[in-house]
Structure formats: structure tokens, C-alpha cells
Amino acid sequence: MAMIDEPLYPIAVLIDELKNEDIQLRLNSIRKLSTIARALGEERTRKELIPFLSENNDDEDEVLLAMAEELGVFIPYVGGVEHAHVLLPPLETLCTVEETCVRDKAVESLCRIGAQMKESDIVDWFAPVVKRLAAGEWFTARVSSCGLFHIAYPSAPEQLKAELRTIYGQLCQDDMPMVRRAAASNLGKFAATVEQSHLKTEIMSIFDDLTQDDQDSVRLLAVEGCAALGKLLEPQDCAAHILPVIVNFSQDKSWRVRYMVANQLYELCEAVGTEPTRGDLVSAYVRLLCDNEAEVRIAAAGKVTKFCKILNPQIAIEHILPCVKELSTDSSQHVRSALASVIMGMAPVLGKDATIEQLLPIFLSLLKDEFPDVRLNIISKLDQVNQVIGIDLLSQSLLPAIVELAEDRYWRVRLAIIEYIPLLASQLGVGFFDDKLGALCIQWLEDKVFSIRDAAANNLKRLAEEFGPEWAMQHIIPQVLEKINNPHYLYRMTTLQAISLLAPVMGPDITCQQLLPVVIASSKDRVPNMKFNVAKVLQSLVPILDQSVVEKAVKPCLVELSEDPDVDVRYYAHQALRACDQMVTPS
């Protein structure tokens, strides 16, 4: 008897747990559906488990979401693709619930199952589900149906295809804006499966209705449809049908629709090709750059370089640059920031002369902007301008502003300048760097912000690598070593860090003669933090120094530190001594 009852046990547990008051138990049971299905076997899963799930779908959204997700990968547990249709009823019911995320997951699972079903099963089982949902009394069913047409359509016979196109057209004219939104959102996917002859007639007619919808939430989703449909149509059809819609949308009364056009403009340009772009779309883009709403100008400004790349440079200079000049002094800091993040990319597009005459003044005004993000966005892209105008002009025009920013009151701006210095140094060359920027690099070691001091120490290492140890010995090392006498211990610690970073670049001789004596002298510092940092620096120097130097100078210093009253100093001194011993052992 036990043998007969045993297979019933998992389904009994599932039923009990699904009806349990504790949501966590119900959730756990749903997530174990695959285990239970394996225990039951394919036939009983089809005949008992799936019908049970179809009947018990009045639950918390969390449980229903988990069920919708599990059923999407359930084909192997019901006997493979030939029995996949048994999974459709519970998912069809989940497509009608009120919670959006449950419906979306149910649609996603239906699409996954439908993509694996045989063509005959799609016609017999899947298409009827789509039609029932599309005719649903409650709007949620109709919303869900919009996401399923692209799966049902390709396998359908001609008569059913015509019916599906008609139903989709009706959904696009539904009384409920939510249904029309879903239809607009999924139009691109559905259109991709429709034949060219019907695409130009029925689908374009549906699309035209959506573009004139009285709800802006529907129209802005139709903007996305422009790009999707544009890629499916022939260039001449695209110019005839899609281009006028884009131009109209750029003047739409709703700022959200105009924002969507500005955001998608480059994709829309790609869809309609370059020739029409140069005429109608340039004027549409100029309107968006000068829009009343800051959000629209932000989206448009962020696309300015991308848009200019598909234009003739002369058109960009004539039509786009005047707008860019206006935006560089826009009342919204976010507009200026969006512009600053992309404007440097315009230099290669416009060429040297236009960059020098037109763009450089804009760069300078943005470099002096009161909002730190604007300045940061310009600094981080300076190399793009250098490639076009050359270092001489860059240094004459922009360098004074960069030097000013090196002392900016916002530490993130100072940090961005420091990170750019090595690149600038390699472009400027040694002579120019020494005159203009050398003093700044040392000055940053005594910044009030730790991140700046840390970046400054790393910056010195990168400069030493760029210009070589001899240059560093002359221009960096003496100034760095002077800082060890600073009355504040935090700045003395930065000097130790700089020594630790510079030593591998400088080599054993300079390290032994110039750097090591300063480190050892610092072991007498009155601040424990300094002393344990001395131990850490000495540990980092051990691989660089000769063994005899380690024995004569480093180890005695570490032994002394290992007897310090401070526990942290002793700990790091012992660690460094162990590192010394390990270096000796292999040899």
C-alpha cells in the first residue's frame, strides 16, 4: 500500500502547501514545481498538476509571478514539445490578472513556449489563446494579447493571418489607453513578421492611427515604432511614411513625445537614411535643441555629436553649431552637462578650422562653468580635441583654464585633472610640462582631501615612468622628500606613500641613496600611524634593495619598530621582518 501511496505524496504536499496561510510556504512549493513534476512523471503532470495550477491561481502576486516563471521552462516535464499546449491554459489565466509584472512574465513564458511549438500546434492551440485574450472582456487580457501576435502570425495560414491583422488593428483602436499603449509598444515586433505587401498597407494604416492618438503615452510609444518600422520598409517608403511622422512628432504638443523623439533621433535617422536626414530632420533637430522644456534640450544635446556624424560638416556648422553655442549658456545646468559630455566629439567631425574658430570658445566657457559636472565632462574628453588641433593650440587656449581647475574648490574636479595629467604630459612633452604643470603635481601632495593626495602620489609614479628616472631625480624626488618635514602627519604619510610608489621606477641605487634614509629617519616619528607606515614601506622596498642593504639598514630599523609600545606598529614590523626572512630563504 505504501508503494501505491508514495507517488501521491509530492502532489499532496504541493496542494497542502499551496493552500497554506504562510506565503513563504506557498512560494517554496511553486518554486519546487519541477521537482514535483519529475516525481509525478510526465503523464500525471499533464493530467493532475497542470489542471490543479489552472484552478488555483487566485493567490498573492509573488506566488503568481513565480508560477508564470516556472511554467515557461516546463516543456520537458510535460512530455516535450508535442504536449506543450497543456501549459497554455494556466498561463492564459495569468495573462488576465491585475498585476502588470505577473502578466508580463506570463506573456514572456507563453512566447518562450510558442517559439518551441510545432506549426500545427500553434494554429490549433496558440492562436486561439491569442484570439481569446484579444477578445477578453477585461482590459488586462487584451493588453497581454498584444505581446503574442508575433509568435502566432508566422505559422498561421492566410485566412488566420488576415484575421490576426484585423484583430491587431482593433486593439490599436481599443477604448482603453492601456491596450493601445501595449499595441503601440509591440507593433515593431508584430510588423517584423508581416509580409511586405501588408506592411505597406494595413500595418502603416494601424501605425498612422497610433501616431494621431489623443493620449501622449500612446504617441510616445509610436515614436519607438518609427525606428522599428523604418528598418523594415524600403528607403523610398520610409521617406514617404516615416519621415513626416518624425517631423510632426518633433513639434508635438506633449513634451514627453518630443523628449522621446530627441532621445531616439539617431536611431530614427539611421532608419530613414542620410539623404532625407540632411533636409527635414535637420530642421526637426534644431527645433528640439531650442525646445522650451529643459528635458527635451538635455536629450537633444546628448545626441549632438552622433547626429553631426551623419551630416555634411558644412550643414553641421551652419545649422547645429549656432544651437550648440546657445546651449553652452543654457539656464539649466543639466543641459550644459549633457552638452559637455559629448561636445568634444564634434572636433573630429567639424575639422581643425571650425574647431579652432567655433568650438574652442565653447569649450572654454564650459571649462569655466559654475557647475562642477560640466567642467568634469569637458576635462575627461580633452584628448579628442588634441587629435584635431594639436598640442600647441590646445596648450595656449585651454591650458590656463586647466591650471585654474587644478585648484578648483570641488575635489572631484581636481581629481579629474590629476588623472588627466599623465596623458597631458605625454602630449605636451617634458619642457612644456615642467614650466606649466610641474609645480601643481607636487602641490597636490598637500591637498586637504585624501583621494587627491592618493591620486597625486600615483600621478608622480606615472610621470616618472613617462619621463624617466633621471628627470624624476631632478624634478620630483627633491620636492617630494622635502614634504617629510611637514608638521601634519597626514601629509608626511603621503610622502611615504609617494616614496613607496616611486622606488620601483627609480631603481635600487637611487632608492638606497635618496629614498631609504628618509624612510628610516621617519621610523623615529612620534605618531604611531607614521611608524607602522614606515614598516609597510620598508616591506615594499625589500624586493628592490640589495640583500646587504636589507641586512645592514632595513632589518635593524624593523627590529626596533617590533619592540614599539604601539600594537599596530609591532604587528606591521613583524610582518615586514617575515618578508625579509622569506627573501633570504629562497637564495
Image (cartoon, helix red, strand yellow):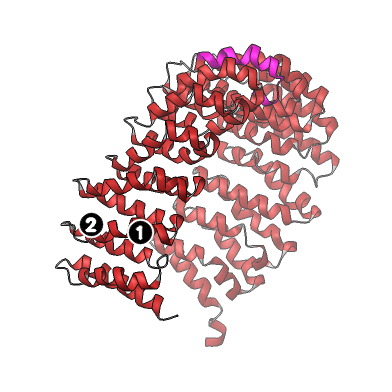
Instruction: Give, as a three-letter code, the residue at label 2.
Output: Met
Left or right: 463 as drawn, with respect to 155 = left
Between disc 1 and disc 2, the foreground one is: 1
Camera-side residue of 111 and 510: 510
Q: Which residues are magenta?
A: 308-326
Question: Can I make out residue 413 in this image?
Answer: yes
Give the residue displayed 46% in from the left and 15% down from the top: 329
> Residue 224: image x %, image y %?
64, 30
Query: Which class describes the residues within 10 Å of circle 1: few (<14), some (14-19), or many (20+)?
Result: few
Seen in the image, is 384 located left or right of residue 272? left
Q: Quadrant of the N terminus?
A: bottom right
Q: Position of residue 142 (x, y in %)?
A: 61, 38
At horizontal 52% and vertical 21% (from top left) the residue drawn is 296
Majority secondary structure in the magenta region: helix
Q: Quadrant of the C terminus?
A: bottom left
Q: Is residue 265 visible?
A: no
The numbered disc on residue 513 is 1
Q: Secondary structure at mark 1?
A: helix
Mark 2 = which residue?
530
- At numbered mark 2, what does the secondary structure look like: helix, strand or loop? helix
Task: Determine which quarter of the picture holds residue 222.
Answer: top right
Q: Position of residue 318 (x, y in %)?
A: 65, 11
Count of numbered badges drawn on the protein:
2
Seen in the picture, residue 444 relative to 174 is either above or below; the reply is below
Left or right of 222 on screen, residue 278: right
| Amino acid type shown at disc 1 | Gln
